Image: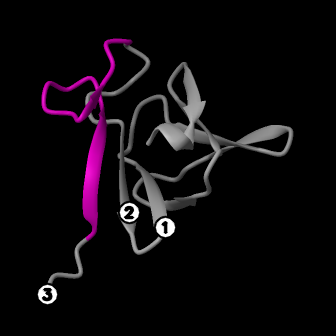
Amino acid sequence: ESNSPKVFGVIGRGVHCDVRFTDASISLFHARFWQEDTYTFLEDLNSTNKTRYVYGEGTVQLKPYEPLIVDPGTSIILGRHQFSSEVI
């Protein structure tokens, strides 16, 4: 049995990304997300314009390759795009 995460998707501009953007504020391979047990994780892939999430009145930038457990309804910011974690 493998302990590797179940990758549900890679977000970026690259042709092989599962969720694709054409906007230049999104890196070719910007972030990835997966689920383990009942948790959803989001990880920045050392993107140029970073991955952030809304926390209180401000935003927090994810450190590259340090996954965040994402709660339902969390606002995620990739480049110039903001959306709810419920869409991932």
Mark 3 crowdedness (10 Å alpha carbons): few <14, some 14-19, many ≥20 = few
From the viewer's perspective, is residue 42 above or below residue 17? below
Magenta highlight range: 5-23
What residue occupies the far bottom of the structure in this picture?
A: 1
Mark 3 vs 1: CB contact within 8 A: no
| Tag 1 and tag 2, C-beta contact below 8 Å | yes
**Pointer 3 residue:** 1
Above or below residue 66? Residue 15 is above
**Quadrant of residue 15 within the rendered picture:** top left
> At which x and y percent is residue 74?
65, 45
Distance from Cα at disc 3 to Cα at disc 2? 16 Å
Q: Nearer the viewer, residue 25 or 72?
A: 72
Rendered residue at 13%/87% (across/down): 1
Residue at the extreme top: 23
Label number found at residue 39:
1
**From the viewer's perspective, is residue 48 above or below residue 33?**
above
The first of marks 3 and 1 along the sequence is 3
Going from N to C along the chain, the mark reached first, 3 or 2, is 3
Q: Nearer the viewer, residue 30 or 16?
A: 16
**Mark seen at residue 35:** 2
Residue 16 x %, y %: 13, 32
- Report how far apart the C-alphas of labels 1 and 2 lie in the structure: 6 Å
Q: Is residue 8 magenta?
A: yes
Type of amino acid under label 3: Glu
Q: What amino acid type should be assigned to the residue bearing mark 1?
A: Tyr
